[in-house]
Every structure is written in structure tokens, then in C-alpha cells.
Image (cartoon, rainbow, N blue to C red):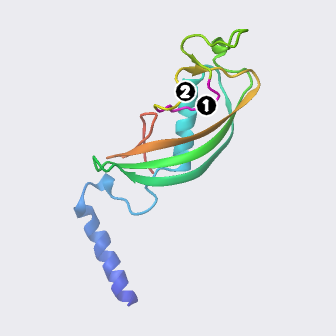
Amino acid sequence: MRGAFLKFLAVTLAAAPLSGPAQAYCMFGCDPTEDHAKQIFENLLKQRFDKPGKLVEFKQTMAERLEMHATGEKGYEIFFNAKVQFPDGANLDCKPDDAGAFKEGCSPSKHYVTAPRNSDPKGRQYVAPGETVLFDEEYRFYEDPKGWKGPDGNVYSQ
């Protein structure tokens, strides 16, 4: 029984390179990782806020494979929570006036995101100096011949 399994495994591994492009072949550990999501978060944080924040905590809470039914395109989502301290605040020009009104292009929302989707806040978000911001987000990756394309436009692979 063991010999038959080993023979099957050897034949499968030997034939695998013939089944498609080498970079598309992967048996284990090919999905996007928490480290990939963290790198994307750090990239997008710099784009979304004009002052640096200090990443205090980053934790993946869930991950799942996806397949878009209409197109057959493969995807992967990583859900995470992050905590960022802004010692100097961020987007200070978006601070509401004394009446609590926000200027055009600024969002009053306290739901902070780095990769906004249609239902997420539009515009830049004010962060008061010394404030710690909590993020509860998910990133969707799309399969690419070289790995997985993240929401920051970069391709990530093992």
C-alpha cells in the first residue's frame, strides 16, 4: 500500500511540470499570507494618511479562497485587524471647524480603511494628534501568473 502511494506521488510530481507553466505550479503554501497583507497595509497607510503612523498591532482574523462565478477568476481574501498610533495626527487639514463641519474632500467617518470600496468612506479622514486608530478590513487578492495581485497593485508570491 505504501509503495503504491509513493509510486503515485512520484508519477504525479514528475508529470506536474508538463501540465502548465512552471510559475503556475504550486502544491502547498502558495496563497497570500498575513505578511503579504501587512506589507500592503503599510504601503496603503502611507498613501491614505499624510503623516506617519506607528503600526502597533496587526492580526489576521480569517482567510478564504474565492472564485468569481461569472468570470472564473480566482481570488483570495485576508481579513485582519490593525491598530495604528498617530503621534502627530494625520490629514490635519481635514479637522472639522468649530461647527463640526468638514471641508470638501474630507470624510467625517470614523470607520478607517486603507483600501476603500464602494461602501467605505469617501475622502481623506482626520486623525487627531496622539490618536490610536483601529482598522477592521479585508484585502482581496487576484490570481496572477506570477503570484497574487494585491489591492496596492503589487504582485506577491512565495
The image shows residue 58 at horizontal and vertical percentages of 64, 43
Say if mark 2 contacts mark 1, CB within 8 Å. yes
> Looking at the image, which residue is at 23% across and 62% down?
19
Q: Dot 2 corresponds to which residue? A: 121
Say which of 65 and 158 sits in front. Answer: 65
* Quarter of the image where one finds residue 121: top right
Residue range of the region highlighted in magenta in the rendering: 109-117
Amino acid carrying label 1: it is Tyr
> Looking at the image, which residue is at 67% across and 28% down?
53
| Magenta stretch encompasses residue 114 | yes
Say which of 17 and 36 sits in front. Answer: 36
Side of 35 relative to 151 (left or right): right
Q: Secondary structure at mark 1?
A: loop
Side of 12 relative to 35 (left or right): left
Say which quadrant the N terminus sits in: bottom left
**Disc on res. 112:** 1
Amino acid carrying label 2: it is Pro
Q: Main secondary structure of the magenta part?
A: loop
The image shows residue 93 at horizontal and vertical percentages of 64, 11
Classify mark 2: residues with Cα within 10 Å, few (<14), some (14-19) or many (20+). some
